Image (cartoon, coloured by chain):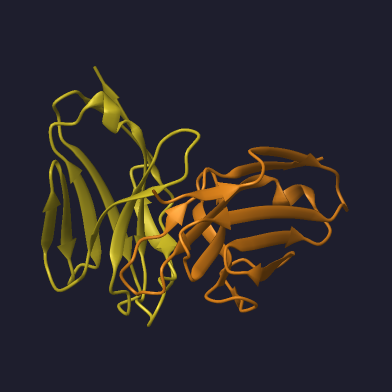
Amino acid sequence: QQQVKQSPQSLIVQKGGISIINCAYENTAFDYFPWYQQFPGKGPALLIAIRPDVSEKKEGRFTISFNKSAKQFSLHIMDSQPGDSATYFCAASILNTGFQKLVFGTGTRLLVSP
Amino acid sequence: DVKVTQSSRYLVKRTGEKVFLECVQDMDHENMFWYRQDPGLGLRLIYFSYDVKMKEKGDIPEGYSVSREKKERFSLILESASTNQTSMYLCASSLWSSNQPQHFGDGTRLSIL
């Protein structure tokens, strides 16, 4: 019940295209869903996050879509650029008083071809 | 700027050795975390700490222990290293707040021979 399933494992998108990464969870107690971006040789960094009281959150070219009834959420990268090539991790957490105990997906390696 | 520093980028140790991985953050964060990252498995939480001398088990604590004697420093200890502990280890920190992001170091790639 603590798992977060992520797909696809890898993705190749042409420059200017839309990249879509999907995640699904089982634990309905999760109430915080962040996406982290990781470049080679670097640690992950928070990209965007959503709470389940909204169905969509947009920050620039990055959008999270959230479907509470289906227990699914996805990351959409519009107008994908070669600089977006990285590994993306979805995660889920039950928000405690002072910390997030994140459960991560298995990651998606995105390559945006020029 | 936020900075989480892991003492080694690469480390090679032998089976049975006691291994120390060190992490220091300069942001006065209350929370610190240790993860391991393996291909196809994502990041898995080993231990975390929300205060000096406090620690909580994560999802895969077996074979590991931690130490937090000072607020800025969080150490991961492999009591008797085994080959299945060969991995990338990531340290993170965050403020004591439910909606603050975790800030990660760049990782230590540990090989146990």
Residue pushed farthest bottom?
A: A97
- The quarter of the rendered structure image containing the C terminus of chain B is top right
Q: Nearer the viewer, residue A39 or A78?
A: A39
Name the quadrant containing residue B64.
bottom right
At which x and y percent is residue A65? 15, 57
Compared with B61, A112 (above or below) is above
User: Residue sitting at 19 percent across and 31 percent down?
Assistant: A80
User: Residue sitting at 65 percent across and 69 percent down?
Assistant: B68
Task: Tell me which chain appears orange.
Answer: B
Q: Nearer the viewer, residue A67 or A43?
A: A43
Q: Is residue B17 toward the left or the right of residue A42 in the image?
A: right
Task: Tell me which chain appears yellow.
Answer: A
At which x and y percent is residue A102? 42, 66
At which x and y percent is residue B6? 60, 47
Name the quadrant containing residue A68.
bottom left
At which x and y percent is residue B14? 85, 44
Q: Nearer the viewer, residue A85 or B90?
A: B90
Q: How many numbered callouts?
A: 0
Q: Is residue A100 toward the left or the right of residue A83 in the image?
A: right
User: Residue sitting at 33 percent across and 43 percent down?
Assistant: A8
User: Residue sitting at 42 percent across and 47 percent down?
Assistant: A44
Q: Is residue A5 toward the left or the right of residue A74 in the image?
A: right
Compared with A15, A44 (above or below) is below
Residue pushed farthest top?
A: A114
